[in-house]
Structure formats: structure tokens, C-alpha cells
Amino acid sequence: MGHTPLHGIKVIEMGTLIAGPFAARLMAEFGAEVIKIESPKDGDPLRQWRKLHDGTSLWWYVQARNKKSVTINLKKEAGQKIIRELVKDADIVIENFRPGVMEGWNLGWEQLSTINPRLIMVRISGYGQTGPYRDRPGFGAIGESMGGLRHLTGYPEQAPVRVGVSIGDSIAAMHGVMGALMALHQRTKGDGKGQVVDVALYESVFNLMESLLPEYGMFDFIRNRSGAALPGITPSNTYPCRDKKYVVIGANADSIFRRLMIAIGRNDLANDPELVHNDGRVPRTNELDEVIAAWTMQHSLDEILEALSKAEVPVGKIYDIADIVNDPHYQARGMIQQFELPDGCSVKLPGIVPKLSRTPGETRWIGPKLGAHTAEVLYSLGYDEAAQETLKADGII
């Protein structure tokens, strides 16, 4: 236990669904004590999202692994009091409510940092804690759209599409974790004080937009959807195979491009002086893509993978989840783990990322039942059995 990097760090998670809970999950995987606050009635709505087994979402077992579930009614003064007691020796509070909600419960930064000046508060919201849009409800889809990602995703002649997961929320969560770890480091090395980590979904997405902004600022260039191709890098695309499958080929370094052309029998293009560098290839993107597709259409996916791997050209199939589970590389790196549910059924959960050589993270337990740790945590604050019975009767826990 003492060998996880965040051992001894206490995190109070006050959030639901994706962004806040994913940030706390990452910390819990590396040893932080995460106390997840849920509403006594239904808990986190994620418990009911997507495919359920026995009334509980399978996603829940991943998203809430290693967390303690404590039910507290935050709308009532007695519930807010419990949070303030918990915060006294907490290191981090993570919340993803709309700005102002925590303040309405007397649990805003002003109140909590007075109780504990060492506290770090990670606040994840659609638009951030300031600015003209701060009060709008923000979801991942909105953040992805406003951050510039949706405009780039899909084919130019079709409507923008979404990535198949809530990527905006997860990107915001990761920025939240980065900010929290930096603030922890600053607290240790600096003056011992905490601070607010203000994460906006749209900004987290915008942060990944590569050269989008300088290209617009300099050339008024507005990048558009480019299907499966990597814009301005040629060739890097998805190509059809003879057996109706698709293959991804990334020959975007000059030496790799040459090896690819030789492998597909186009020495003329391998030796074309115009195509030696990427800036010469880009104006001929369509021509090169047609040449590569003409070759891939004559071969099965397996034949292509074999031929191009031999030529040391980056090549891959498009994995579905069945491919992932059966892949020896995934298995060798411990990325497919098996756990037992309370009813004896087994559930597969992803391994822990990233891999630390000396103090790796671990799955200590899977997502807990609602309120599984309420009694334990309240005892630690000095609430005896009688006090807890009163709180239950009053609908606080």
C-alpha cells in the first residue's frame, strides 16, 4: 500500500458522471484515498449508464474502482457540515458542478480554503469559473464543439461527427489531474498553501488543437474535416482491403514513404525527386492515396499487414473490442484484467495507465455499492452509531 505514488493523499470527490469522477479515478488508481460523495437516494447517475448487469452499469465498476462511496445529502446543512469536517485534513477536492452550486451549499473555495489553507480544489466545468458563459450548463459534446474538435471530425461533405466516447470530459479530467499534481508539488516545494485548479471542458479540448490557431492567425486558414487522412501529412490515411476490411498506413516520414513505394512496386514514385519530402507530397495527396488504395484493394488485410510490417512501414488494422481482448500485446502488458463481482460473475476491466516502473498503480477493488463506506468514514469523523442513525432518519445519509 505504501508503495503507490499518491499513498497518503486524501481526495474528496464531489462530482457525477464523467469528468470529475474520471479525474478522481486516476488518482485512486495510484493510491490516493478517494472518498466519493453520492446522493443517498440514487447515487451517481453513471451507476445506470449504458449496459447494466444486475441493475448496475458495467462502466461503474471501472469509473469508481478504488473509491469509497459515502452518501451525503449536500442540500441539507447537516450534510454540508460533514463535508466541512472531511475537508479539514483533505488534500484535494474535485467537483464538476455548474459554477456557483458549491457556493450555494456553503462549500465554495472561500469557505473550504478557510477551513484548510492547504486544500487544492479542482473545479471542472463546461466554460470555467469566470467569463460570460460561466453559468451555462456545459457537457462534453458542447466542449468538443466549442474547443474546435467537432469541426475537424468526419468527412468534408458530411455533417461533423463525434468521437465514439465522451472524449471532451476525459481530456478535461486529465488536465484536472495534471493541475492537481502540479499544485501538490508547488504546495510541497513552495509555501505549503493550496490553490484552485480551474478546468474548462472547451479549453481542455482546445489545448489539443495543434497548429489550428497560428495557421488561422497568420494565413486566415480555417482547417476543415479531412475524413481519415491526417491533414498536411502525406500519406497517412485509411485504405480499403480486398476482404472489405480497412487498413491504416502512416508513411509520413521521408524514409518510410520510400520503403512503402518500393513495397507496393512503385519504384518510379520512390525515386521521384518531387516526392522526397512531405511538402512535395502534400500537393499530390490524392494521387498518392489512389496509388496506395489501388494496391491495398488487391490484397487481404492480413497480406497487407505482413508485407508492410516486413518493409518497416507503420501499419495497423482498426481494432474493435474483440480484437483488443484477443490481442497478445494487450495481454502481455496486463491491459485486460479480470475481477469477480459480488454475485460471482467475472468482469473484465482495463489495466492501469501509465505504467510506473517502481510504484505502479493497481485495482484494489472495483466500483463499490452505494454507501458502502459511509459508516466507516463517519466513524473516523467521530459520528457514533446513534449519531449515524439520526442522520439516516433525517435523510442526510
Image: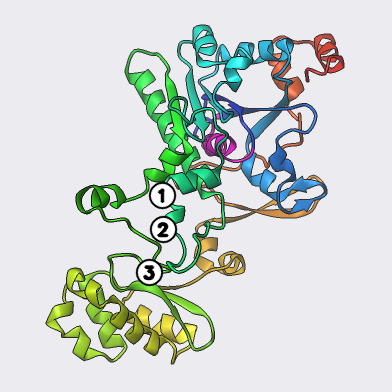
Which label sits on residue 229? 3
CA distance for labels 3 and 1: 17 Å
The residue singled out by tag 2 in the image is: 152
* Amino acid marked by disc 2: Leu
- What residue sits 49% from the left and 78% below the top? 246
Q: Is disc 3 in contact with disc 2, using a CB cutoff of under 8 Å?
A: no
Quarter of image, res 248: bottom left
Q: Going from the N terminus, do you reach mark 3 or mark 1 first?
A: 1
Q: Going from the N terminus, do you reach mark 3 or mark 2 first?
A: 2
- The answer to if 27 sits in the magenta stretch is yes
Task: Report the quarter where the C terminus lies.
Answer: top right
Secondary structure found at label 1: loop
- The answer to if 379 sits in the magenta stretch is no
Q: Is residue 359 visible?
A: no
Extent of the magenta region: 17-32
Q: Residues within 10 Å of mark 2 (few under 14, many from 20)?
A: many
CA distance for labels 2 and 1: 7 Å
Secondary structure found at label 3: loop
- Frontmost residue, 330 versus 119: 119
* Amino acid marked by disc 3: Ala
* Residue 134 image point, x, y percent: 49, 28
Q: How is the image coloured?
A: rainbow
* Residue 148 image point, x, y percent: 41, 49
